[in-house]
Amino acid sequence: MAAVQETIDQVKSIDVTEYKYGFVTEIEVDKPAKGLTEDTVRYISARKNEPEWMLEWRLDAFRRWKTMTEPTWSRVHYPPINYQDLYYYAAPKMGASPKSLDEVDPAILETYKKLGIPLREQEILAGVEPGNRVAVDAVFDSVSVVTTFKKELAQAGVIFCSISEAIQEHPELVKKYLATVVPVTDNYFATLNSAVFTDGSFVYVPKGVRCPMELSTYFRINEQNTGQFERTLIIADEGAYVSYLEGCTAPKRDENQLHAAVVELIALDDAEIKYSTVQNWFPGDAEGKGGIYNFVTKRGDCRGKNSKISWTQVETGSAITWKYPSCILRGDGSRGEFYSIAVSNGMQQVDSGTKMLHLGRNTTSKIIAKGIAAGKSDSTYRGMVSAHRKAIGARNFTNCDSLLIGDQCGAHTVPYIEAKTATAVFEHEATTSKIGEDQLFYCQQRGLSEEEAVALIVNGFVKEVLQQLPMEFAVEAQKLITISLEGSVG
Amino acid sequence: MAIVTPLKTAAEQVLAQQFANVKAELPGGGAVRKLREDAFAGFEAKGLPHRRLESWRYTDLRMILREAKPLAGSAAVTPAVRERLAALKLDGTRLVLVDGAFAAELSTLEALPEGVSVNGLADALVSQRDDLTRILSGPSVSADDSGLMLNTALMRDGVMVEIAEGTELDAPIAIVSLTSGSEERAIFSRSVVLAGKGVKATIVDINESVGPAAAQINNAIVFETGDESEVQHVRIVTRQQPESVQVLSLLATVGAQAKFDSFALVCKAGTVRQQNFVRYAGEHTEIGLRGVNLLGGTEHCDVTLVMDHEVPHGTSRELYKTIVGGEGTGVFQGKVIVRPQAQKVDGSMKSNALLLNDGATMFNKPELEIFADDVVCGHGATVAQIDGEQLFYLMARGLPRPQAEALVLQAFAGEAVEFVAEESLRELIMSEIEAWLGERRDSAVVSAI
């Protein structure tokens, strides 16, 4: 019973009763006027000192975006967003790209310290065993403030930098891969992102290289009325491996903020990308005031033979989540995985899931989605598994379970399973239930309070997904889930 | 994205013209007339259902119905119709519709069991009964379906069966809808079954064509069953021309502590859309929807279910078995809605499909929409080919490949047929399935594993 005792202790040790990352950092920022016009796009491009082709690319996206309408098919409800009432760029006042940490505003460093994100390499080295080192790209509002361990990564041949830097330093790679997975006009939010994306991470792992450490990006929205539009591009060349983590937080504010990101993953022959997200944007208060609108397009392309892309996500934050990390299984023998835990409480709305598009032969995919809805929240799993005519031997297993806590929440499942080849084998199963009375009774009989018992059962419910996360994140995620559900019992 | 309604298609224009021409002569008093007008206005606004509508995603009627056929008028009782009726092996009461019109002379009206009364729908529509609007409207979840709206606007005839409180029938009542098929026609019919409290009855619903011309059939059947009733509906849709298009709606409102089961077999039926809208009107009710779809050629069968749990303590069981060969397309869309007050609902939905060869397609979309926390709901959906190990087992015992496949498929389909309570009906269904499998076996087509 040691393991169980450990979990209980851990649950007990958490005494946070509210969103703990909700503080605001007071710093001077540089931002253009509110609103979105061609000038805004030019401003962003100019601020980033971008080459002409990039500006043209953005303007083209902007013109297309103007002709599009916002999608309404998802099961989320929000007042119309006034895209002219937002700031599209906010950068802390400092040099465009600081050369070292000394140039970074101490207030920002303090912020990351509070968030528990190590930015000073020497500190990390001093305190942690080398095996656990994680390289961090820290994005603060619209710009990347620092990227750690760049030198060491460069020795291995790995390029890890902000996307703005990649556009300057590695234009050939960016040109070759950008928007090849998520086309510019893929959807309304992706097109908007293409026009105004400000920063994000760029990773290129060359042939045969196993990235020596975990890479991670930490996104922080700080400014008021500011949208964050980041763009991440990860390329694993033949035989390469990379594990990438993403974390997000934002201050508590009364108004809603928009976050519309695009993430593109490309895995060539025999490459593997593991992408983990712990999303903890401010979810809004108990009455549903404030919070982040998280409209994200994430897609991976298993372009090469026997490549593999694995998405793991723990979604606890955001007022509205609209994201479907997907895999295009193009290469023969490629594999896609999706592990998700979506926890919603208060007035949160989650519409999330995945798409597994089987195009190549003998492609396999696995989907494990766990939704936990409490309070007055709504949680929807929306997923598609499809096999193209030529996807001989495609195989999918999907399992989505929903757990309802309280009688005012909703859980929905909308799976699409489309097989166009006889040799495809698709299995889908879904269940929705509340926590078993007998399980609760069993735990309470052994002396746990109701809240502890619920936490324990929930942890068991999501264990399959948590196991997929890198160690450091798994512990963090487990805490998050418990915090998110706090106050949902009784 | 906003749904943009494109210009009216040729079929939509013809339908509008037809409605304008016939609305004055279609049966019905003031209330029914208003229902028709409203339904057609709704249809005009929405147009024919198309793939941009979520509930019609896989059956694009706008594309399928390139032209609207002329409306069928009176029943064309051809010799082929009489022959087929004579050949049908059915016990009990027989109510016959030919081209959607009630043919009293072909029906066994003189020997109706006690407690059962039958009227042609056309007569029922002009009778001034004040519950007509309610009965015809069915469950609210069907309200915005434009395929059904078209039926409401243009329904000409059908039967209305009323079974009095407490009646327990020993033999089934069969509603046989035959299409004469001498000319290409559009048929709009609707039948109604009203079963009072404690009724036990089985309604057989046969849909066949006896002529060479393909029909466009839009047929609805409405069930209102009382508390503590046990009603079974068995539908067989077969012997249709490959080019025929059928939209078959089932609207069921089921009372408290009642049982309602519906089984449907679809084989050799062209393009079929079955849409079942079921409402739980009382607590502790058990509802089962099951079916077998056997598809080949370019056949298309869409099964769309909406189970609306409005009240607590409802049980639902859905099981659909689809076998797709040739260039066929199978569709299963099942939606279970559990409303906030509907606690203690127990729902389980399963769709299994076997694809026999490349070119065959299956779309599965089992949906759960749950707003109550104390429920046990689950769904499963599978798509696969015939299990190689099962085949190997049978072939190792000396069965040739085609026979072995037929046996495996028969067992696969049979799982859903078991739920039909009436033995004679089970046999009838199995004989249709065996005939389909026999043809495949004899043509020595084997699956692609």
Image (cartoon, coloured by chain):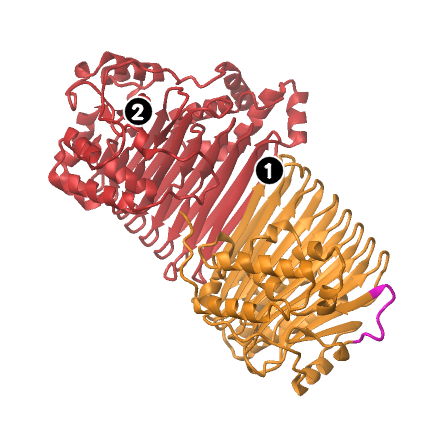
Q: Which residue is mark 2?
A: A131
B216 displayed left or right of B139: left
Measured along the vertical axis of the image, is residue A388 above or below residue A198?
A: below
Q: Are marks 1 and 2 on the same chain?
A: no
Chain drawn orange in the picture:
B
* Magenta stretch secondary structure, dominant: loop
Chain holding disc 2? A
Chain holding disc 1? B
Residue B94: image x %, image y %?
76, 73
Measured along the vertical axis of the image, is residue A453 above or below residue B10?
A: above
In the depicted view, which residue is nearer to us: A244 or A316? Answer: A316
Measured along the vertical axis of the image, is residue A370 above or below residue A392?
A: above
Q: Quadrant of residue A114?
A: top left
| Chain A pictured colour | red
Element marked by disc 1: loop
Q: Which mark is residue B371?
A: 1
Residue A276: image x %, image y %?
37, 33
Residue A307: image x %, image y %?
31, 47
In the depicted view, which residue is nearer to us: B107 or A176? Answer: B107
Residue B382: image x %, image y %?
53, 54
B74 displayed left or right of A150: right
Q: Quadrant of residue B165?
A: bottom right
Q: Quadrant of the C terminus of chain A?
A: top right
Measured along the vertical axis of the image, is residue A266 above or below residue A280?
A: below
Q: Please say whether residue B265 is one of the residues in the magenta stretch.
A: no
The range drawn in magenta is B108-116
Element marked by disc 2: helix
Q: Residues within 10 Å of mark 1 (few under 14, many from 20)?
A: many
